[in-house]
Amino acid sequence: MNKLVIYGVGLIGGSFARALKAAGAVRHVVGIDRSEASVRRALELGIIDEAATEPESEAAAIRGADLVVLATPVAQTGRILQGLLPHLDAHTIVTDCGSTKADVVAAARAVLGGRIGQFVPGHPIAGRETNGPDAAIADLYIGKKFVVTALAENAPEAVERVTGAWRACGAIIHRLAPEEHDKVFASVSHLPHLLAYALVDDIAGKPHAGLLFQYAASGFRDFTRIAGSSPEMWRDISLANQAALLAELDAYMAQLVHLRERLAAGDGATLEAVYGNAQRARRQWIETIEAAEAPAPKDTAE
Amino acid sequence: MNKLVIYGVGLIGGSFARALKAAGAVRHVVGIDRSEASVRRALELGIIDEAATEPESEAAAIRGADLVVLATPVAQTGRILQGLLPHLDAHTIVTDCGSTKADVVAAARAVLGGRIGQFVPGHPIAGRETNGPDAAIADLYIGKKFVVTALAENAPEAVERVTGAWRACGAIIHRLAPEEHDKVFASVSHLPHLLAYALVDDIAGKPHAGLLFQYAASGFRDFTRIAGSSPEMWRDISLANQAALLAELDAYMAQLVHLRERLAAGDGATLEAVYGNAQRARRQWIETIEAAEAPAPKDTAE
């Protein structure tokens, strides 16, 4: 493509730009970020070719763009779309990278109205514990999933422009409806984050917290790793995916009430059955992942 | 010491024997295990010098031992002590490696009666995801904690024989009362295990489990790593530490009820405060660990 515009030049947006450049899939990249230092750094690092820091340069950047990518916190989606709509050419496609989709789609519909077909929502399943332009790397998305939650209004070519770009970054394309996406990630990502935060906060609030942390070992470290994530980002995700997250939390709390009752009754057989079922399911899942990650068997004729 | 007897020649017992041999701190090691294949393998690997597989050889092994270590599931403590008591010399000290202590002490008191002073309960805080004699390594305990939960009846020399051996393995000695130990580990180890098992079992039981596991990523993998542990062992630990575990579970469930109510109310400020507090507490903990693990600054005169 000729011109790509990125809102947010940190880990997610910056890595997308680096990967497309490495693949020779983009000619010119313009970066926009609420942090001036980040845009300057992204320019220095060669992640972007041009910085648009003023409203006038933002308008000029949007005009004629092939693809506009929002790699910003989901709560900013509506405001950013409002800013770019007056300058949006009919051929330009806009996409996003948000961890929640139903709320992003609702915000986009409210702002874009009849032009919603130009917005193709998506979510790359990749991340690291670092952030900012310096964290951006060209191979972040290789072998990772990109979930496109296409809308009925999206033309096949619009969807293809987005998925084609992610494919060029090395990502594997998956398709889910926005609501389905949010239910899945409430279960395997948003709920675990809430649970890990809750446990560390619970322990930190006890009078003997210092003694407890002194004996916490590697199992605790892994279990709570996700509680090291950004509180602001996870506050936004929790609220954006409130309904699905509440449903998952309720199911989990019902499971805990059941286990508590069995533990109080000294029912070792049920505890072992639940633990054993979890161990088996997890082992099967890991084996599936490892089989998918293993290199394909070599052609015997080679 | 002259003679060491180990019940259980797997990861924990085998590594203890290997470490003492590497330190030149033991002359002769006898191994006892309910699995004959394990004792044979431990003998082959040079972890033990002698295998005691029959009641007669077990009796002979116990007689004259300086130290007897139980590295077996906690539920077997009473039965093993019953078997060795008739052959126990007055100078022999018995210790254990169990993850729970109040139940082990109760079982030992019930069996040993007036000779309880010869039993010094302990818990080495180390482990790996592998098991059996082949997993045993000499440096498993280097820099790890050994918690001794000494009893009022233990003579200082009895405690020193146990802690001295663990110090020779490279462990750092900590002291807690048995009940204190159990509360601490209910909080930072037993509860996290139950929570991880509960989550994976909950997800595995959903009709769309396959879809969910397909999108589970590295955060989920770390969060649930401890759900890969032995269900039998964790059933025993859960039951052995029932009271402390129930208390921790109740505190955690109260925390979840509070967070659920705040999430339902759309109270982003409270969510962010809880998440932020957890992130800060965890970061502080990691920094403390890393400072403790960092090599001491070099002498400038070097």
Image: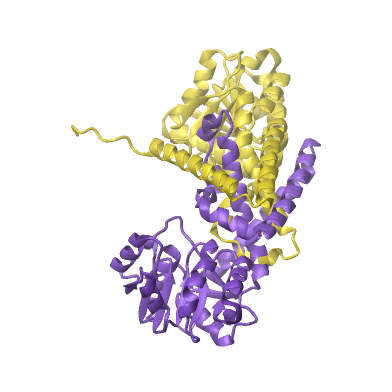
Chain colours: A purple, B yellow
Give the residue drawn at x 47%, y 71%. A83
**Is the residue B94 above or below the residue B100 in the image?**
above
Q: Position of residue B295 (x, y in %)?
A: 34, 38
Specify whether B50 is left or right of B179: left
Give the residue drawn at x 36%, y 39%. B294
**Is the residue A185 above or below the residue A272 in the image?**
below
The quarter of the displayed image where residue B10 is located = top right
Q: Position of residue A124 (x, y in %)?
A: 52, 68
**Is the residue B153 above or below the residue A214 in the image?**
above
Q: Position of residue B215 (x, y in %)?
A: 61, 65
The quarter of the displayed image where residue B88 is located = top right
Give the residue drawn at x 60%, y 24%. B121
Q: Is residue B2 visible?
A: no
Q: How many marks?
A: 0
Specify whether A69 is left or right of B207: left
Who is closer to the viewer here, B123 or B285? B285
Q: Position of residue B118 (x, y in %)?
A: 61, 17
Specify whether B27 is left or right of A104: left
Give the residue drawn at x 69%, y 66%. B210
Q: Is residue B57 visible?
A: yes
